[in-house]
Amino acid sequence: MATFGGKTVFGATLGILMLNTRFPRVPGDVGNATTWPFPVQFKVVRAATPDNVVRGDATPLLGAFVEAGRELVDLGCDGIATNCGFLVPFQRDLSSALGVPVASSSLLQGPLILQSLPESQSLGILTISAETLTEAHLEAAGLAVGTPVVGTGVGSHFTTRILDDAAEIDFEQARADNIAAAVKLVSDHPEVGAILLECTNMVPYAADIRRVTGRPVFSIYTYLTWFQAGLRPRRFSENLDDVRQVDIQQE
């Protein structure tokens, strides 16, 4: 039986569009390939930086993201993601232009998470920059304007080292900044029943945030593992390997 091709790279169906950065990325970070339990393909959008996407107006960069996304699709990707939650306004344009499923931001999980919570609880967002996460970002993700949002702080080590694209990061201090912000989120908004991490660099601290807040924590990791499960569904064996042995007497 013939096997057909049609693309250059096989076995890595998820492509991730990356901002142009130099800061270190530990396991758990979206840009560390060992984070993922499946192969991924990366493409750097050279014109996009943490500063001009998070602190500035990313709109002029849409064309560059479309071009880079098309390169990943041509290479063999069947779904495209980005590594910055602030790119959620690009969702419709990217999916229309690329013709494949797109996961532009972890924030897109928000409505589904809300559906899972009791009516008395709300979703809380932890972000790298509460000052620039606008109503437009929330609305693009299908979230209410009044959704509780807390940032890691303009002067915090985590925020400044990531957004300034520093060559060195003290990850223990970054962990402390994320924990402090999460504690503030649930202290200021005790009705928060689940936390959604906007920033893809927050994933290494998700387990710590869960431990100190007692709330479920969702992130780009939870989103893209779900996304990948649709792009490449697990094939299950039809064999029963745990069959109980039963004596069958022949009549």
Image (tube, rainbow, N blue to C red):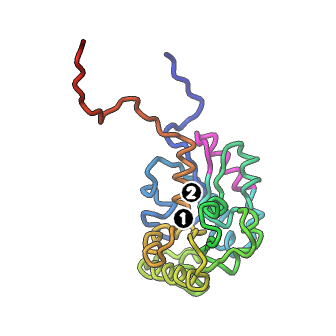
Q: Which of 22 and 153 is in front in this view?
A: 153
Quarter holding residue 224: bottom right
**Crowding at label 1, few (<14), some or many (≥20) Cα neighbours within 10 Å?**
many
Q: Where is residue 36 in the image (x, y as percent from the top left)?
A: 46, 54
Name the residue tied to disc 2: 223
- The C terminus lies in quadrant: top left
* Mark sitting earlier along the chain (1/2): 1
- Most common SS among magenta residues: helix
| Identity of the residue drawn at 77% across and 63% down | 60
Secondary structure beneath disc 1? Answer: strand
Q: How crowded is mark 2: few (under 14 residues within 10 Å), some or many (20 or more)?
A: some
Q: Residue 218 carries which label?
A: 1
Seen in the picture, residue 96 relative to 141 is either above or below; the reply is above
29 with respect to 151 (left or right):
left
Which region is colored magenta? 63-80
**Residue 27 locus on image (x, y percent):** 42, 63
Residue 240 locus on image (x, y percent): 34, 32
* Residue 193 falls in image quadrant: bottom right
Query: Measuring 24% from the left and 30% from the top, which residue is drawn there?
Result: 245
Q: In the image, which disc is placed on residue 133?
A: none
Q: In this view, does 39 lie above or below 246?
A: below
- For residue 19, say whether it is visible: no
Residue type highlighted by circle 2: Tyr
